[in-house]
Image (spheres, helix red, strand yellow):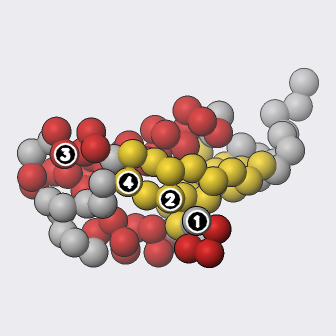
Amino acid sequence: MSSKTQPISRRYIVPLRRAFEAPRYRRTKVAVRLIREFATRHMKATEVKLEEDLNELLWSRGIGNPPRRLSLLMDKDEDGVVSVKLAPESEQ
């Protein structure tokens, strides 16, 4: 049985409220971990890669104040690797 799968693209709104249960000096790190866990769970991923724009947005307000929720576009390739990027604003 082959581990190759069909390419999939989905749009999700990811809640990050659990990041605010962490101490202030750790919140953005927890938000990154939550996005990776969300992508792994919903896309059945073997590996998750965050795009640079998404990473910059998460860290733009510092380590203590990440966004509360994000609209993300997740693309899964044939090897099971998921790339996560910001969803375009026009789709909302």
Disc sitting over residue 69 in the figure: 4
**Residue at label 3?**
20
C-alpha separation, residue under disc 1 versus residue under disc 2: 9 Å
**Residue at label 1?**
92
Quarter-of-image position of residue 15 = top left
What amino acid type is highlighted by mark number 2? Ser
**Closer to the N terminus: mark 2 or mark 3?**
3
For the N terminus, give its image quadrant: top right
Between 23 and 79, the residue placed more toward the observer is: 23
Disc 4 or disc 1, which is closer to the eye? 1
- For label 4, the crowd category at 10 Å Cα-Cα, with few meaning under 14, some 14 to 19 and many 20 or more, is few
C-alpha separation, residue under disc 1 versus residue under disc 3: 25 Å
- For label 3, the crowd category at 10 Å Cα-Cα, with few meaning under 14, some 14 to 19 and many 20 or more, is some
Q: Are marks 2 and 4 in contact (CB under 8 Å)?
A: yes
The residue that appears at 38% across and 54% down in the rendered structure is 69
**Residue at label 2?**
71
The residue that appears at 63% across and 53% down in the rendered structure is 11
The residue that appears at 56% across and 73% down in the rendered structure is 89
Quarter-of-image position of residue 40 = top right
For the C terminus, give its image quadrant: bottom right
C-alpha separation, residue under disc 2 versus residue under disc 4: 7 Å
Between 20 and 27, the residue placed more toward the observer is: 20
Between 39 and 49, the residue placed more toward the observer is: 39
Q: Are marks 1 and 2 in contact (CB under 8 Å)?
A: yes
